[in-house]
């Protein structure tokens, strides 16, 4: 087999090698710096860092402030499971039903002054609950929550069991949406 390229004669090869050795190696530029070219970029980066830290802190505060709602919603789900389960003992079912008004009261006490909440009973309590729920349309005075207080004291046979689903839905809505009410006019 013959090669496609004929080898250079020895003197030409020596001259080519000598010429190549006289060449300097290519100079590579320094890698670009990661430092900003102006102070403005550093200031902007610091401002963005501070802003993101502040937003994260505010989000954590809001999350912590809503902890009472998450706990109440979790407890309501546990009570709903006890009330709806066919395997719950009658005494457990009655205890779960009796806890519904107390759960609402505890949640109200978590975000409103005790002096404002503690003395409220009956219609005044229902009106306060309606004022604290946007768009309630008197749901606690005349709607599904009108007999909320009955669940705490009536004998088991007199409890309004058919109204339980509507009451549970209203309490769940109240847990997630209630706001401090506007003062009564």
Image (cartoon, grey):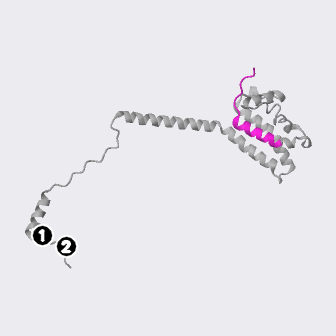
Considering every residue shown, the one lying at the far bottom of the view is 1
The answer to whether 133 appears left or right of 155 in the picture is left
In the rendered view, tell whether residue 13 sits above or below residue 76.
Answer: below
As helix, strand or loop, the secondary structure at mark 1 comes to: loop
**Residue 54, horizontal then vertical, whole percent:** 52, 34
The residue at 81%/44% (across/down) is 96
As drawn, is 33 to the left or to the right of 101?
left
**In screen coordinates, is 164 left or right of 5?**
right
Magenta-drawn stretch contains 179: yes
Confirm or deny contact between disc 1 and disc 2 (CB under 8 A).
Answer: no
The picture places residue 86, in percent across and down from the top left corner, at 83, 53
The residue carrying mark 1 is: 8
Residue 101: x %, y % from top left: 80, 37
Residue at position x 75%, y 26% in the image: 116
Rendered image: mark on residue 4? 2
Instruction: Name the residue rendered at 12%, 70% in the picture.
Output: 8
Q: Residue at x 83, y 28 (%)?
A: 123
Task: Say the numbered circle drawn on residue 55.
Answer: none
Q: Looking at the image, which is closer to me, 184 or 89?
A: 184
Which residues, given as a range, are shown in magenta? 164-185
Q: Quadrant of residue 70?
A: top right
């Amino acid at each position: 087999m013959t090669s496609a390229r004929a080898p250079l004669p020895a003197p030409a090869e020596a001259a080519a090698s000598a010429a190549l050795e006289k060449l300097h190696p290519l100079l590579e530029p320094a890698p670009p710096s990661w430092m900003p070219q102006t102070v403005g970029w550093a200031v902007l980066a610091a401002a963005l860092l501070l802003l993101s830290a502040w937003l994260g802190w505010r989000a954590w505060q809001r999350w912590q402030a809503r902890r009472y709602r998450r706990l109440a919603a979790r407890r309501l789900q546990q009570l709903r499971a006890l009330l709806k389960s066919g395997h719950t003992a009658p005494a457990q079912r009655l205890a779960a039903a009796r806890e519904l008004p107390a759960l609402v009261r505890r949640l109200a006490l978590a975000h409103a002054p005790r002096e404002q909440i503690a003395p409220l009973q009956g219609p005044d309590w229902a009106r306060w609950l309606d004022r604290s729920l946007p768009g309630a349309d008197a749901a606690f005075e005349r709607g599904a929550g009108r007999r909320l207080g009955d669940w705490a004291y009536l004998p088991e046979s007199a409890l309004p069991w058919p109204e339980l689903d509507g009451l549970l839905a209203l309490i769940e809505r109240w847990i997630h949406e209630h706001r401090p009410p506007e003062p009564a006019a």
